[in-house]
Each structure stands twice: as structure tokens, then as C-alpha cells.
Image (tube, grey):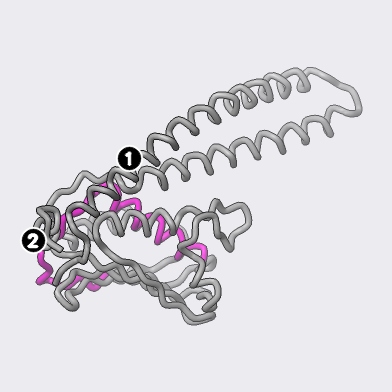
Amino acid sequence: MSSGISNSERERLQAMYAEIATLAGGLAHEIRNPLSTIGMNLELLAEDIDEETSPNTHRMKAKIQTVQRECRHLEEILNEFLQFAKAGELDLVEADLNALVQDFIDFYQPQAADKSIDISPHLDADLPPVAVDQSLLRQVLMNLVQNAEQAMPGGGLLEFQTLVRNGRVELELIDNGSGMDERTVSKIFNAFFSTRSGGSGLGLPTVKKIVEAHLGTISCESEPGRGTRFTISFPHATMSHDTSKGGA
């Protein structure tokens, strides 16, 4: 089964991703420097205020803390923007998807337990290998479980499933959280769209960009009160290699 992307198209996408990453890196540098200066000066102001005893000291300190909090938020958005911009740069290796998923589950288990989230893996024993960037795949999984956490603030069930369907290797993450309506589902992969106050709106768009750079697809099914299912479909390693050599 062909991925439908030719070698020339893949090269064009990689060149575009590289250009975007370069521009993003330059933009981040230009923003981070003055942001760092602002942060340092706020710390100095806070120290000076700590030495004051005037009635206005408490109000002034509260205002400085508010600005410091917003600076930290800007830094977080900047870091997520850089992740988004660089998501198309791949270091592909042939790997066992089950092993990668199980490694992530082992890593994530303590955090899940702390949030009263039960993990249920159902991993197909007969998966063909896939060509993936292991670091970026972990980022995909982390972004998706963070999305699930937000949908299950009181805890719940998170399932990881792998399977082969229509000649491709699929990974499903299913939660039994609050779910989303059709309008929200239609927008979740749009950059800067967020249902969470203070969210950057780049987590799921980054996931989509990483998956598509792997010649994969991602879809979402959800229903309010019934939970959410994300399905990622990868070509197996042989298909990826054939495509990179110019297969249509």
C-alpha cells in the first residue's frame, strides 16, 4: 500500500520544514534575549521591594509576581513553538513500535498513578517494524497523554493499542474522559486553537506535524462524556524505505 507521497514531494516538505525551523530559531533568539532581560530586572525589583517597609510594598510585589508569571508563560509558549517548528526534522531508525510504546508506559506510569490514571496496554505481538524518530515519537505520546490528563482531571482509564490494519501499523490512545463535541474535534489540530485557559494551542498541531513527517496520518474520534480515541497510522519500515527511494 503506497503512502501517496513521492520522493520529490518528501524532499520539498523537508526543505520547507528546515526553512521554517531556521526562521523559528532566529525568532526565538530575538524574543528570548529581551525576555531574559525583563526577567532578571523583575528579580532585582522584587529584591529591592523586599527591603522596603512602605504600605504599598505588598501591592507592588503582587504586580511584579504577576508580570513574572506571564514571562514564564511566554517562555513556555516559545519553547512549544520551537518544538512545533522543528517537528518535521527526522532522525529515522527502524524500530519495534511495541517496545517504544512499552518504554513510554514504563516512564509515564508514576505520573499516571499520581493522577489516578490506570493504564491498559493492548499491544499486537505481530507488528512489522516501523521507521520512526524515537525522540519525536516520545514527544507525540507525551503530548497525547497530557491531552488525556486534561480530559480526566479526577483520574480515569488510558488505553494504548497497537495493531495492523490495511497494511499499516496503527497506534491508538483511548481515554474515558470528558470528550469533545464535533466542532472542537474539527479544530484541535489547528495551530493556536486551545480549549484550555493559558494553553498554547500547539500540542496537538505538533503531534500532527510529526506524524505527517513520518508519512503517517492521525485522526480523532470523540463524544462529550464518552471519551476520546486518537488513531495514528504509520507505514511499516519497508514501505517508508520504498517511498524514500522514489515510490509513489
Say if 93 sits above or below 176 in the image: above
State how far apart marks 1 and 2 are (Cα). Answer: 25 Å
On the image, the x and y values in percent for residue 102 come to 23, 60
What residue sits right under mark 1 in the picture?
Answer: 18
Q: Which residue lies furthest to the right in this view?
A: 55
Count residues near mark 2 (Cα–Cα under 10 Å), then give few for <14, some for 14-19, many for 20+: some
Tag 1 near tag 2, CB within 8 Å: no
On the image, the x and y values in percent for residue 168 come to 18, 71
Q: In which quarter of the image is residue 234?
A: bottom left
> Who's the residue at 62% across and 26% down the image?
39
| Quarter of the image with the N terminus in it | bottom left
Q: Which amino acid does label 1 sit on?
A: Ala
Residue range highlighted in magenta: 121-150
What residue sits right under mark 2 in the picture?
Answer: 238
Residue nearest the observer in this picture, 48 or 79: 79
**Is 129 inside the magenta-drawn segment?**
yes
Count residues near mark 1 (Cα–Cα under 10 Å), then give few for <14, some for 14-19, many for 20+: some
Q: What secondary structure is marked by label 2?
A: helix
**Is 206 inside the magenta-drawn segment?**
no
> Who's the residue at 19% across and 58% down the image?
6
| Quarter of the image with the C terminus in it | bottom left
Would residue 45 be found to the left or right of residue 203 on screen?
right
> Who's the residue at 17% across and 78% down the image?
166
